[in-house]
Amino acid sequence: MERPTRHEQAQAILQLKGARLASRIIGRHARTASDYEEAFNLELVDLISEITTPAALLALGRNVVGPADGLYVLDDGDTYRVYLQDRGDIRSAVSGASFEEARTAAVECILRLGGLPYRPPG
């Protein structure tokens, strides 16, 4: 299979479809970090650069506090709160973050939420 562009790889990861894409690229079930390194050629900056506006940041997760598990991205006016909720427990919380800090935190949370045993270099 022809390798998708870095933009397409980043989009798949941000949409929680990274595992499926990696498996398709390498032709077998991607399980380990080395499988993902073989499949992807993107860098962390590629994921972060996909989030260009506050609206794009907010669209990555839930924006109202609630009981559901998943990624929460909350706009607190001039700052953002980003956290991953799992079975009612809050993990990877960042509050009072600027847009740049919040989108980096959101990408880190998405990598964890997607279950990828991989962190792009950069």
Image (cartoon, rainbow, N blue to C red):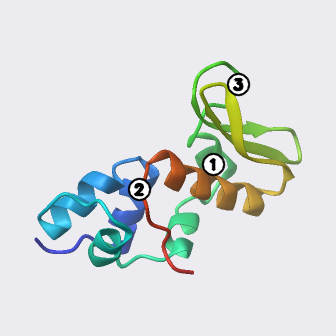
Looking at the image, tell me whether mark 3 or mark 2 is earlier in sequence order: 2
Judged from the image, the secondary structure of the residue bearing numbered disc 2 is helix
Q: Which residue was labeled with disc 2?
A: 13
Q: Is residue 31 above or below residue 74?
A: below
Q: x, y percentage for residue 22?
A: 26, 62
Tell me the number on the disc at residue 113.
Answer: none
Camera-side mark, 2 or 1:
2
Q: Residue 99 or 68: which is nearer the viewer? A: 68
Circle 1: is it few (<14), some (14-19), or many (20+) Cα within 10 Å?
Answer: many
Looking at the image, tell me whether mark 3 or mark 1 is earlier in sequence order: 1
Name the amino acid, label 3. Val
Q: Residue 93 or 117: which is nearer the viewer? A: 117
Q: Is residue 68 above or below residue 108?
A: above
Circle 2: is it few (<14), some (14-19), or many (20+) Cα within 10 Å?
Answer: many
Which residue shows up at 65% across the image and 18% down it? 67
Q: Which residue was labeled with disc 1?
A: 57
Disc 3 to disc 1, C-alpha distance: 14 Å
